[in-house]
Amino acid sequence: MGDAFAEGAPTQVNADQDGNPIPQAPDDVDVDGSALGSGPVHPDGCPPDPTVSITKVKHTFVGDKTKTVYGQSGITLKVEVLKGHTWTGTITYSAKLSESIIVASAEETISGSISYAKTTSVALGGTWKVPANQSDGWLALGSKGYSFNWERGSYNGGCKWVVSSHGTAKLPALSPYLAHS
């Protein structure tokens, strides 16, 4: 056996198992949170796990399926809604996740006016005639909003992002709005 394992050998203060000194901070150094970085640190040293990652954001019309009418060329389409009518956006999933988590992440990332549902504050209606140069068309109540991809996951021990659920969403942001094809 070597001397490092001999019984009765004095143990070096601040020495690693190989006998080399362990670097020490000076006694008079105060370390506060700002010296360690600007945010929380994952236990493995990876970036912190985001709740939901939002990508491929686009402005879009978010229509109410119950207040959408279709017709052929030359037909006048009409949509009416009473005050208090509510419609929702759509969210697709690979594995079920609470809509509120996705909506909250979209509000934080894209716009604070995003929601899962919108309600009209006034009675609203409109007509539109499908032009002769179109074979068919539609008229719908809805709102301007956003479509995007989302994913939820976490970092594994190797700091690799592992997706646990993903999907798409189309959520209203402004209320109300009439659109046609």
Image: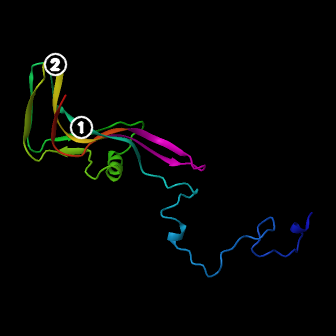
Find disc 1 in the rendering and name its residue. 62
**How far from the left and from the top, in percent, is residue 142?**
18, 38
Of tags 1 and 2, the one toward the viewer is 2
**Left or right of residue 41: residue 20:** right
**Left or right of residue 95: residue 175:** left
SS assignment for the magenta stretch, majority: strand
Residue lying at the far right in this picture: please name it.
Answer: 1
Q: Are marks 1 and 2 in contact (CB under 8 Å)?
A: no
| Residue 177 occupies quadrant | top left
Which three-letter amino acid code belongs to the residue tagged 1? Val
Of mark 1 and mark 2, the one earlier in the sequence is: 1
**How far from the left and from the top, in percent, is residue 50?**
45, 52
Q: Is residue 83 above or below residue 43?
A: above
**How far from the left and from the top, in percent, is residue 55?**
40, 43
Q: Is residue 167 above or below residue 13?
A: above
Find disc 2 in the rendering and name its residue. 133
Identity of the residue drawn at 44% across and 40% down: 165
Residues shaded magenta:
147-167
Q: Is residue 3 magenta?
A: no
Question: What quarter of the picture does the C terminus occupy?
Answer: top left
Identity of the residue drawn at 71% across and 71% down: 23
Q: Is residue 161 magenta?
A: yes
Identity of the residue drawn at 31% across and 51% down: 107
**How far from the left and from the top, in percent, is residue 103?**
32, 47
Query: 73 and 19: which one is in front?
Result: 73
Which three-letter amino acid code belongs to the residue tagged 2? Asn
Residue lying at the far front in this picture: please name it.
Answer: 133
| Residue 87 occupies quadrant | top left
How much space separates mark 1 and mark 2, taking CA atoms? 25 Å
